[in-house]
Image (cartoon, helix red, strand yellow):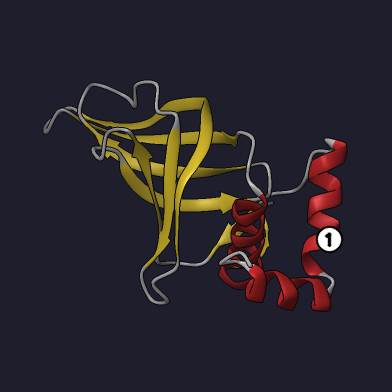
């Protein structure tokens, strides 16, 4: 039995994840959901780029991070974690779609960046845990 079985059962009973999985499988673009405060993303293989998770769906996410002059360089996976509940989803395969500077600070040579990430081939456990995170850590659609 997978480590996600209990969460998956709860989601399927509530009918929550099946719609998300169907939409993802059919390739239909989903609306992004705003993430509650306290959730973060780490890009891997480097631990340098850690940022606040802004929005998410079963296809990808957007987060904001602060860095020097170098944006994230070719990460191939990420980690999602939430502080209050200790939720953690490790080694999620991904690709960066956009990584844009939204604010420069010339006094400190730092940049605030907004990064859009697309998930790659998720395992059933990753889909389950992602669905659980979306159900429990989001608060409505992005406008």
Quarter of the image for residue 69 reads top left
Which residue occupies 58% across, 64% down? 133
Q: In this view, does 104 lie to the left or right of 40?
A: left
Which quadrant is the N terminus positioned in?
Answer: bottom right
75 relative to 143 in the view: left or right: left
Dot 1: element: helix
Q: Which of 46 and 109 is in front in this view?
A: 46
x and y percentages locating residue 2 in the rendered image:
61, 64
Q: Residue 57 at what x, y percent from top left? A: 66, 50
> Which residue is rendered at x = 52% and y = 36% of the image?
93
Residue 49 coordinates in the image, percent (x, y): 29, 38
- Residue occupying the far front of the picture: 1
- Count the marks: 1
In the picture, measured across the screen, residue 90 lies left or right of residue 28, that is left
Residue position marked by numbered label 1 in the rendering:
18
Splitting the image into 4 quarters, where does residue 91 fall?
Answer: top left
Q: Position of residue 92 (x, y in %)?
A: 50, 43
Of 9 and 15, which appears nearest the observer? 9
The residue under the point 27% across, 33% down is: 46
**Quick one: label 1, few (<14), some, or many (20+) residues within 10 Å?**
some
For image coordinates 44% across by 36% down, the residue present is 77
Relative height, residue 64 to residue 8 (above, below)? above
The image quadrant that residue 114 belongs to is top left
Q: In this view, does 104 lie to the left or right of 36?
A: left
Above-or-below relation of 63 to 106: below
């Amino acid at each position: 039995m997978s480590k996600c079985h209990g969460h998956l059962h709860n989601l399927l009973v509530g009918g929550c994840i099946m719609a998300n999985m169907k939409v993802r499988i059919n390739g239909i673009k989903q609306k992004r959901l705003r993430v509650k405060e306290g959730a973060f993303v780490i890009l891997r293989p480097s631990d340098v780029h850690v940022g606040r998770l802004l929005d998410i769906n079963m296809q990808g996410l957007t987060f904001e991070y602060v860095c020097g002059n170098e944006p994230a360089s070719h990460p191939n996976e990420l980690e999602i974690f939430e502080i209050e509940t200790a939720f953690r989803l490790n080694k999620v395969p991904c690709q960066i779609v956009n990584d844009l500077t939204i604010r420069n600070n010339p006094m400190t040579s730092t940049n605030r960046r907004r990064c859009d990430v697309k998930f790659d081939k998720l395992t059933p456990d990753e889909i389950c845990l992602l669905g659980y995170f979306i159900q429990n850590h989001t608060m409505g659609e992005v406008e």
